[in-house]
Every structure is written in structure tokens, then in C-alpha cells.
Image (cartoon, helix red, strand yellow):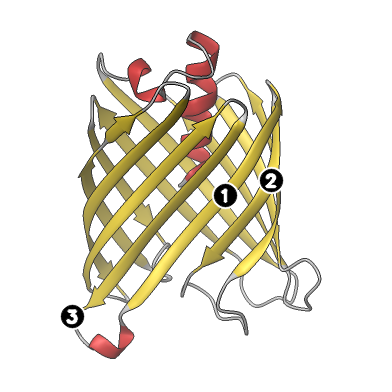
Amino acid sequence: MLASAAVESHAAQDEATATQPATETVNKGWAFTGSAFGYLFFDGSGDYLQPTVSAQKGRLYFEGRYNYEERDTGSLFGGYQFSFGKEVTLDLTPMLGAVAGEIDGVAPALELDLTWKSLNYYSESEYVFDFADRDENFFYAWSELSWQCAPWFRTGLALQRTRAYQTDREVEAGPLVGFYFWKMEIATYLFSPFDDERFAVVAATIDF
């Protein structure tokens, strides 16, 4: 998920300069990232954990998710990363995934990571084609716009569209803050902060 891209970008800036693409730091071997996103609902509608693991070698990229498209549902993606730019860097990773569990289907997906100096825009999106019922096809998206205002801290805005839980809103939005240390980031998100259905997400991401 996004926090993994944030940690990779932060690590790349430690080793190089802020304008060099993060992919330059992972071309020598396999790089692995693990994250866990805890969804905490203030109305007691059912907290849950959404883990993600990813592996990258050069431009080859693989990602596994659980509880992302739906509760008790896993997905596995594979793709290839394309990188552009020096002053402004853009990484595009088109992927194709298989989804199994409460939903069974296939999902074309795209991850986008755009960086200029201390500003970063990240987006991951997918469209799930449900084998059982095409009326259940669904577009998922997670986006973040953040400013790394210190080497150990970033803040910004996040948006999400998902079917893993039910709310009255098509898209939830809210502020985020993230803290870096070692090879890890701890981030907190508060979605729909002015709504009775507000909820928080606490995420931990580590590179290894």
C-alpha cells in the first residue's frame, strides 16, 4: 500500500538525492516491504487488519494483499515498473491480479508514484471483475498527497474508495501524519473527520 512507497522513497533520499528515482536503489537484488493497516471504527462497526507484502527486483514487482478488496479475501498481483524523470520523478506500475475469497475474480491495477522535491503524490487503483456477478464489479482506489516537511515526518491528505466496509460515502477523505525511523514508518489517517461515521487507520510499514 501507500506507506510502503513512502518508506522506499524516504530510504532512497537518505542514500541519494531527493530528485533521484527510488528504483535506482532497488535494482541490485530483491527488496521486500511489509505493512499492516488497522481500521478502527468509532461506531463499533467492526475493526479489522489489512496486511500487504510486496517484493521487487529491478522493475519486476509483486504484491499480496488480504482484507483489501473485501473481508476474508486475498489478492496477488504482478507487474512491471516504468520510471521517468530526474527533477520530477514518476513511477508507473501496471499490474494484473487474482482475487479469491468472498470475491472471486481478476483485477487490472495501477500504482503511481509522483515526486517533486518534498512533495509526493501516490495512487493505487484497481477494477475487480467478479466472476460470480458482473453487477458486483467494483473500482477501488487509495490516494495520498503528502509533504515531507522533515526527514522524520510527513503530513498530507488521503482519499479512499473501497467495499471492505460500508458507509454512506462513495469516497472517504481525511488528514494523515507519518513518522519515519530506521527502515519503518508509522502513519495515522483520520477519514471523514467531521462525520458521525469517522474512522481512523493506523499503519506500520517496514522494509527488509
Residue linked to disc 2: 156
Give how far apart the Cα atoms at labels 2 and 1 are: 7 Å
Residue under the image location 49 percent in, 57 percent down: 142
Q: Do the residues labelled 2 and 1 touch (CB within 8 Å)?
A: yes
Q: Please provide percent x and percent y for residue 62.
A: 25, 41
Residue hosting label 3? 131
Q: Earlier in the sequence, mark 3 or mark 1?
A: 3
The part of the image, by quadrant, that contains residue 204 is: top right
Query: Residue at position x 24%, y 75% from top?
Result: 129
Is 90 or 33 nearer to us in this picture?
A: 90
Answer with left or right where residue 10 lies relative to residue 136.
right
Q: Which amino acid does label 1 sit on?
A: Glu
Of label 3 and label 2, which has the lower sequence position?
Answer: 3
- Image position of 95 with respect to 17: above or below: below
Which of labels 3 and 2 is toward the front? 2
Few, some or many C-alpha atoms within 10 Å of disc 3 (few <14, some 14-19, many ≥20)? Answer: few
> Which structural element holds mark 3?
loop
Label 2 is placed on what type of residue? Gly
Dot 3 and dot 1 residues touching (CB under 8 Å): no
Residue 113 image point, x, y percent = 44, 40
Q: Name the residue under label 1.
A: 144
Residue at image position (32%, 41%) is: 92
- Residue at figure coordinates x 64%, y 27% from the top left: 180
- The amino acid type of the residue labelled 3 equals Phe
- Label 3 and label 2: CA atoms lie apart by 37 Å
**Tag 2, which secondary structure?**
strand
Residue 134 image position (x, y, % from top left): 24, 86
Q: In this view, does 85 lie above or below 204?
A: above
Secondary structure beneath label 1: strand
Camera-side mark, 3 or 1: 1
